[in-house]
């Protein structure tokens, strides 16, 4: 005489000794989120902006051309230093805004900082360096001490 034993099924939450705590904290979290939905969202700067910024270094034969993305930065906020073998860029932008209404005062501050030391692949002439900022892109022209000779092209057969 074979009898089948019926398994008692339980939900995972009822088997956990902390299930009641989980339920209470989940309800608390949900209520807390609901109470803050009317406030404007604040975006924090990403870590990559604080560490550095994207740049391109192009060897144009007689000079090196460096292009650096510096969005939201004005000319006055950029500090550029060069030696014969490195270029150092520091930029910082701060903004403050204030809004006064009948029942509240809102103040916001933001800050973005870029810093980068770029070792150069060849010696340059620091006295002849030129730079310009256009649409958030800083372009620095660094004349080289010795121009790079043009490389000879050689055709290679693919096998």
Image: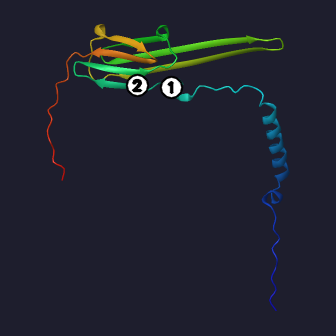
Q: Indicate the quadrant where residue 36 lies.
A: top right
What is the image's colouring?
rainbow
Label 1 environment density (alpha carbons within 10 Å; few <14, some 14–19, many ≥20): few
The label shown at residue 55 is: 2
Q: Do the residues labelled 1 and 2 touch (CB within 8 Å)?
A: no
Q: Which residue lies furthest to the bottom in this view?
A: 1
From the image, state whether disc 1 or disc 2 is nearer to you: 2
Quadrant for residue 24, please give it.
Answer: top right
As displayed, is residue 93 above or below residue 49?
A: above
Give the vertical position of 127 relative to 42 (above or below): above
Residue at left 32%, top 22%?
120
For label 1, the SS is: helix
Give the left or right position of residue 98, taking residue 138 as reference.
right
User: Is 13 located above or below residue 21 in the figure?
Assistant: below
Q: Residue at x 68, y 25 (%)?
A: 42
What residue does disc 1 label?
Answer: 51
Q: How crowded is mark 2: few (under 14 residues within 10 Å), some or many (20 or more)?
A: some
């Amino acid at each position: 005489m074979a009898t089948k034993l019926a398994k008692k099924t339980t939900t995972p939450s009822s088997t956990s000794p902390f299930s009641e705590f989980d339920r209470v904290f989940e309800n608390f979290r949900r209520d807390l989120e609901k109470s803050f939905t009317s406030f404007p969202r604040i975006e924090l700067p990403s870590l990559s902006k604080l560490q550095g910024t994207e740049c391109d270094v192009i060897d144009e034969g007689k000079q090196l051309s460096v292009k650096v993305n510096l969005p939201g930065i004005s000319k006055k906020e950029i500090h550029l230093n060069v030696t014969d073998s490195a270029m150092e860029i520091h930029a910082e932008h701060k903004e403050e805004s204030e809004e006064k209404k009948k029942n509240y005062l809102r103040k916001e501050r933001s800050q973005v900082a870029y810093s980068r030391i770029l070792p150069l692949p060849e010696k340059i002439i620091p006295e002849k360096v030129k730079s310009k900022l256009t649409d958030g892109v800083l372009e620095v022209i660094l004349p080289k001490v010795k121009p790079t000779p043009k490389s000879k092209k050689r055709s290679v057969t693919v096998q």
